[in-house]
Amino acid sequence: MNKILRPVLALAFGSFLLASCDKCEPTYTQPTTEDLDWLVYDTKDSIRFVNESNKVFTYLRTNAYTQNIPGAGYSVSDDCIEKMDTQVVNVIQQVKNQQPGLAITILKTPEDLTVNLVVEDRGTYKIDKANPTFATLDLNGFTYNNVFEVKADSTKATSLKRLLFNKEFGFLSLEMYDGRKLDLKR
């Protein structure tokens, strides 16, 4: 009898565990409309940049996607993930792929919103969305409000030296250590 009872109890316990997973209903943290404003670029946007030689490069929004990721304290290998955060990515790329792709990512958690700027093959840079570097900044004949400056800590020739961004126009300027540069053309 004991030989039969153990497998039956083990099977019942295993079924209970599996059944409890079916009842796992995660909560999803969704970004607000204001959060999504950080993504700047819309589906049909065409963004033009001019380089250090005055050559114009056109960027298009090529990809935008949303993904849910496990919240704090959870991992993808957990049987039951009760909290899911939301990451949204917005990508713009130069039409002929002669310049690095650029992206803006936001991660919405119950406690915060993280904003990252991505420069293809050069890095991901978190900005402190509550503290712009410049309240106003004159750049190429235009005045921009609430501008964030990223200064990378690498000195490799092809590395990013300086990046300027604001929530209204997106990427304003990128400068590499080798002197290459892209400035928003309005």
Image (cartoon, rainbow, N blue to C red):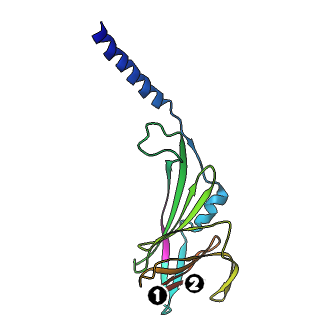
Q: Is residue 26 above or below residue 183?
A: above
Residue type beneath disc 2: Lys
Q: Earlier in the sequence, mark 1 or mark 2?
A: 1
**Residue 96: x %, y % from top left:** 40, 78
> How many labels sit on residues?
2
Residue at horizontal 45 percent and vertical 46 percent from the top = 75
Q: What label sits on residue 180 in the rendered view?
A: 1
**Residue 17: x %, y % from top left:** 43, 26
Q: What label sits on residue 89 in the rendered view?
A: none
Name which quarter of the figure residue 185 lies in: bottom right
Instruction: Tell me the SS state at disc 2.
Output: loop
Give the residue at the far bottom of this rendering.
53
**Residue 181: x %, y % from top left:** 50, 86
- Label 1 vs label 2: CA separation? 16 Å
Q: Residues within 10 Å of mark 1 (few under 14, many from 20)?
A: some
Residue named by callout 2: 185
Which image quarter is the C terminus in?
bottom right
Give the residue at the far front of this rendering.
2
Residue at horizontal 56 percent and vertical 60 percent from the top = 106
**Residue 35: x %, y % from top left:** 63, 59
Q: Nearer the viewer, residue 50 or 166?
A: 166
Q: Is residue 69 above or below residue 51?
A: above
Which image quarter is the N terminus in?
top left
Secondary structure mostly seen in the magenta stretch: strand
Start-end of magenta stretch: 59-65
Q: Would residue 185 be counted in the magenta stretch?
A: no
